[in-house]
Image (spheres, rainbow, N blue to C red):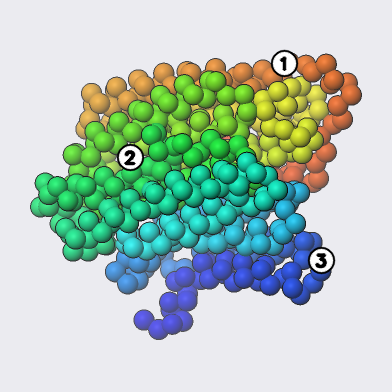
Amino acid sequence: MNYLELLRLISPEAVIVITALALLGLQFITPRARDFCFPKAALGIVAAILCVKFVLPANATLCGGMIVITPLTSLFKIIILLLAFFTVLLARDNSFTRHPCEYLAIILFATVGLMLLVGSQELLMIFIGLELTGLSLYILTAFNKSDILAVEAGLKYFLFGSTASAFTLFGISLIYGMCGSTGLEEISHRFSTESAQPLLIAGVVMTLAGFAFKIAAAPFHLWAADTYQVAPIPSAAFIASGSKVASFFVLGNILLVGFRSADGAMWQRFDPAWFPLVAIVAALSIIVGNVVALAQRNLRRLLAYSAVAHAGYTLLGLLATGAEGFAATLFYTTIYAFTLVGAFGVIALVRRETGGDDIANFTGLVKRSPLLAACMGIFLLSLAGLPPFAGFFGKFYLFTAILHSGESHAGRFLVTIALAGSLVSLYYYLSVLRVIFVDQSPEEAKTPAIQMDAIQRITLAILGLAIVILGIFPDLLAALITNALG
């Protein structure tokens, strides 16, 4: 393969890297770099989306799975780029830093890592993508050096993440030692004959533990609350959205391709020996996330613990059979990601005006900004899983997939836990909505309306409208995912 063909296959990633490097150099060229960096970052992301759409071939495999291009990987590269685009728009309110060009460049480097995660079926390339993403997210968390709590959260995130990376790398080394390959297809061919080996079991458990950290599943979730609460809001939004989408995508690849039952089919239920392990993590995440969220008084911290519960819900799709379960997982995590970006966008504007993001800061929001109140109502009701919003169909899709799987008794038990968790979550989501729409602050008459520019209004309106439309017409996204899975 010549270098031009190689460049064609990695053109979206190349465009993002070039844009990030241009942003780093922009501040040395013009003193007005702050005015140009956001349009430049947004244009770079749009150019990368166009490359995915019009430059990449429909199917290609490079270097034994190091780079894999399929309709599914192309679709999720576009989704990750869209999440990065909305994060860049959210970061326009950059009062937390005097270096917006560097901040946006790190967001773009994290985006490249996520794209590598999505576009590979080789464990070493997946690990490189994890590390590129992880290092970028650690910096994004602690980027506001004037906030000692953000620096502390970044250090905690780094320490937890480094430990998780060590587990992942050690697990990959054991898998390679037992299977003789780091390619998921080759691992799947040898998995059934070697599945009883203790070292292979240890390798799989370590690898899954590393990914459980990335998706903030219990008991590997202790980093999430501090990171969500004190990181700059665009950083928290990207960690909660783009990172989750790519992590669930690659976790599904590993379980359903690398560790699948050896019957020759592409998307099969992973080896039954791993069902109890993943089921326990899913159930524990749902219980811990929802129970602890009840006690939260800070909205970002509440969203962090609800993210733990949502990780448990999403894992149900991976426990289901084959393509249906994986499609449900991808649909739900995509809906969740765009919902979280919108919710953090509202939080950013409220924090700018009130100086805080406790639930009390949202008192009487409907009087100060009907648009923000309506958007936050859509996002929270979708997270709660109520119709006619996209979150309802996402949960319905997940629960149906696990009930249709071969593990009928375990599936019913997990769906029962998930339904109970959803009822608990309804309480704390509605408590926030009561503060927004019903409660009134004594100082409400003196509180000015929340100011927004046109781009902020349009961005939030698009995200809110998308959640409503995908709730009414879920096939607009579900059919794309299903068809891409083939």
What amino acid is at disc 1? Val
Q: Where residue 32 is drawn, which disc sits there?
A: 3
Local packing at callout 2 (Cα closer than 10 Å; few below 14, some 14-19, many 20+) is: many
Q: Amino acid at mark 3?
A: Arg
Mark in the foreground, 1 or 3: 3
Q: Secondary structure at mark 1?
A: loop
Above-or-below relation of 49 to 343: below
Residue under numbered circle 2: 318
Residue 398 seen: no
Could you tell me which quadrant the N terminus lies in?
Answer: bottom left
Which dot marks residue 438?
A: 1
How far apart are the two marked residues, 2 and 3, measured between alpha carbons?
48 Å
First in residue order: circle 1 vs circle 2 = 2
- Which image quarter: residue 236? top right
In the depicted view, which residue is nearer to us: 155 or 311? 155
Q: Look at 55% across and 62% down and name the residue there.
A: 109
Categorize mark 3 by other alpha carbons within 10 Å: few (<14), some (14-19), many (20+).
Answer: few
Q: Residue furthest bottom?
A: 2
Query: Hey, which quadrant is residue 148 in on the image?
Result: top right
Separation (CA) of disc 1 from disc 2: 39 Å
Contact, mark 2 vs mark 3 (Cβ under 8 Å) = no
Q: Amino acid at mark 2?
A: Leu
Counting from the top left corner in percent of width and height, residue 238 is at 57, 48
Question: Whole-percent x and y of residue 189?
Answer: 17, 57
Spatial CA distance of label 1 from label 3 is: 44 Å
Q: Secondary structure at mark 3?
A: loop
